[in-house]
Image: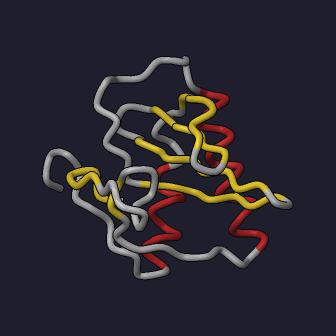
């Protein structure tokens, strides 16, 4: 996602412009990604900054339910949606970001620049 551009139309991802996406079919990669996010959440001190400039998102479909996780590693917030309704906010550390970025880079999904321009 591109945090510089909010996208309020139906093509966005909970209000954010989508730069690209991929489906993770490999079960080992799925487990690694979920484990990385779980560890980041477990290791969090439950605090975040105020920016919420999300660059990552995960959609999980379970039965007839769709859960979306909109992640800002910069401020440590994870907004959780069930369908279109935000149901919770969790906190994470920055530790899962390399795993998220690796999967996106392998799928040739462009990453937006970090806030400091890198």
Could you tell me which quadrant the N terminus lies in? bottom left
Q: Is residue 61 left or right of residue 45?
A: right
Residue at point 61%, 30% (across, down): 88
> For residue 9, which quarter of the picture?
bottom left
Q: Quadrant of the C terminus?
A: bottom left
Quarter occupied by residue 80: top right
Residue depicted at x 33% and y 54%: 8
Count how many numbered circles sit on residues in the image: 0
Which residue is outermost to the front?
A: 9
Report the front residue among 24 and 40. 24
Q: Residue at x 48, y 79 (%)?
A: 106
What residue is rendered at 45% in x and 39% in y?
94
| Above/below status of 68 relative to 29 | above
Q: Nearer the viewer, residue 40 or 23?
A: 23
Residue 14 image offset from top left, x and y in percent? 45, 51
In the image: residue 22, left or right of residue 75:
right
- Which picture quadrant has residue 112? bottom left
Which residue of the protein is positioned furthest toward the right in this rendering?
Answer: 63
Residue 12 position, x and y percent, is: 40, 61
**How did the renderer colour the structure?**
secondary structure
């Amino acid at each position: 996602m591109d945090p510089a551009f909010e996208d309020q139309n139906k093509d966005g991802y909970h209000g954010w412009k989508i730069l690209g996406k991929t489906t993770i079919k490999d079960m080992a990669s799925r487990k690694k990604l979920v484990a990385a996010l779980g560890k980041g959440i477990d290791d969090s001190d439950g605090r975040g900054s105020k920016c919420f400039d999300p660059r990552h998102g995960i959609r999980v479909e379970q039965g007839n339910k769709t859960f979306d996780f909109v992640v800002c590693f910069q401020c440590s917030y994870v907004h959780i949606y069930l369908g279109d309704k935000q149901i919770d906010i969790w906190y994470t550390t920055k530790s899962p970001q390399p795993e998220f970025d690796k999967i996106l880079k392998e799928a040739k999904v462009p990453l937006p620049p970090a806030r400091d321009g890198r």
